C-alpha cells in the first residue's frame, strides 16, 4: 500500500461544481491506494476564479481539476501549458509548482484511451464528429492520436465547423472536412466511428435527431456525455447492433494524469471504479 500522497490536498473547481464526479473518482483511488489525501470541490463564479485559485495555491493545494465554465480562464492563468492545452485554448488541470502554475488539457488523452480500450486504433479510417464547440478540439486531437484518416466535422452552424477546421488545420495531420448536420446522410456511410461532442442528450437537453440507418453496422458510436450514461443516441445505436462507448471512460482516463500529478501514484482505471461512479450517477437521478 502506497502512502506517497500522504496529507496532500487537491481540488476541482467549477460553477456549479456539485455535478462533478471528481471527488468520488479521486476518492475511490485514494482509498484503493491507501493514500491520506483529499479532493475538495470548489464552487467558483467566473469573477471569483482567479482569487480562489490564488487562495488554494497559498493554502498548499497540489493543484486543481477545472470544469465548466473555467477551462479557458485556467489556460490564461497558467505560466506554462502543454500542446493539448494550447491546441484547445483551454486547461482542465492546473498543477501548482513552487514558482509557477502548469496548465494541461487531459481530455484528448482521456478520450483516446477510452476509445483505444473499446475499439483499438483507427488506422486511417473515417470518423464523423458531431459538434464544433470547445469539446470538439480535444476530440479531434484524440482521433489523430488513434490514427484517423479523415474526420467529417458536422455542426448545426456549418460556418462554425469551417472556422474550427481552419483554426486547427496547421496543428493537426488528419484531414478535416467541415459541413452542416444536414450533410450527415452523405458522409455517414463511410464512417468507422461516430462521435457526439455536443451537449445534446445531456440532462434536460433534447437528444440528437439523426438517422442511424445510414451508418454501417460495423461502425462504433461514442457519446462523450456521461450523464445519463446511456443517452438516446447510444440506446438507439445499441438497438441497431453498433458497439457503443459512453462518456464515463473518457472521464475516468482523463483523471489519471491529474491523480498522478496530485498524489504521486499512477492509478488504474478498473471495472470497480466504473461501477462506483455509475452508482453515484444512479443515486443522483
Image (spheres, rainbow, N blue to C red):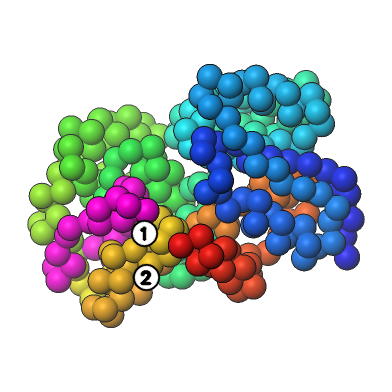
The residue beneath circle 1 is 223
Q: Which mark is residue 84?
A: none
Crowding near pointer 2: few (<14 within 10 Å), some, many (20+)? many
Q: Position of residue 192 (x, y in %)?
A: 28, 66
Q: Which residues are magenta?
A: 191-214
Marks 1 and 2 in Cβ contact (< 8 Å): yes
Left or right? Give the position of 90 relative to 157: right
The residue beneath circle 2 is 244
Whether residue 50 is visible here, answered yes or no, is yes
Which residue is at 25% across, 56% downward? 207
User: Mark 2: which secondary structure?
Assistant: strand
Which residue is at 29% across, 34% downward? 164
Q: Position of residue 153 (x, y in %)?
A: 25, 46
Which residue is at 65% across, 19% downward? 51
Image quarter for residue 279?
bottom right
Whether residue 90 is visible here, answered yes or no, is no
Q: Earlier in the sequence, mark 1 or mark 2?
A: 1
Q: Is residue 30 above or below residue 198?
A: below
Amino acid at each position: 500500500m502506497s502512502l506517497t500522497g500522504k496529507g496532500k490536498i487537491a481540488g476541482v473547481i467549477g460553477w456549479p461544481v456539485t455535478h462533478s464526479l471528481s471527488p468520488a473518482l479521486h476518492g475511490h483511488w485514494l482509498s484503493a491506494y491507501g493514500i491520506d489525501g483529499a479532493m475538495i470541490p470548489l464552487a467558483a463564479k467566473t469573477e471569483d476564479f482567479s482569487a480562489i485559485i490564488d487562495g488554494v495555491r497559498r493554502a498548499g493545494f497540489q493543484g486543481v481539476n477545472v470544469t465548466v465554465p473555467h477551462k479557458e480562464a485556467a489556460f490564461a492563468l497558467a505560466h506554462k501549458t502543454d500542446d493539448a492545452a494550447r491546441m484547445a485554448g483551454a486547461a482542465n488541470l492546473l498543477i501548482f509548482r513552487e514558482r509557477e502554475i502548469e496548465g494541461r488539457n487531459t481530455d484528448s488523452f482521456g478520450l483516446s484511451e477510452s476509445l483505444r480500450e473499446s475499439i483499438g486504433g483507427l488506422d486511417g479510417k473515417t470518423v464523423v464528429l458531431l459538434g464544433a464547440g470547445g469539446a470538439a478540439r480535444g476530440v479531434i486531437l484524440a482521433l489523430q492520436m488513434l490514427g484517423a484518416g479523415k474526420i467529417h466535422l458536422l455542426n448545426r452552424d456549418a460556418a462554425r465547423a469551417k472556422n474550427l477546421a481552419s483554426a486547427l488545420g496547421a496543428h493537426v495531420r488528419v484531414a478535416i472536412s467541415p459541413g452542416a448536420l444536414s450533410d450527415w446522410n452523405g458522409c455517414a456511410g463511410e464512417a468507422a466511428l461516430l462521435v457526439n461532442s455536443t451537449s445534446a442528450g445531456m440532462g434536460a437537453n433534447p437528444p440528437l435527431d439523426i438517422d442511424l440507418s445510414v451508418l454501417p453496422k460495423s461502425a462504433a458510436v461514442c457519446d462523450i456525455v456521461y450523464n445519463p450514461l446511456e443517452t438516446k443516441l447510444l440506446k438507439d445505436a445499441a438497438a441497431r447492433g453498433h458497439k457503443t462507448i459512453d462518456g464515463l471512460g473518457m472521464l475516468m482516463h482523463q483523471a489519471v494524469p491529474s491523480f498522478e500529478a496530485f498524489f504521486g501514484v499512477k492509478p488504474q482505471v478498473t471495472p470497480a471504479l466504473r461501477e462506483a461512479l455509475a452508482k453515484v450517477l444512479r443515486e443522483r437521478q
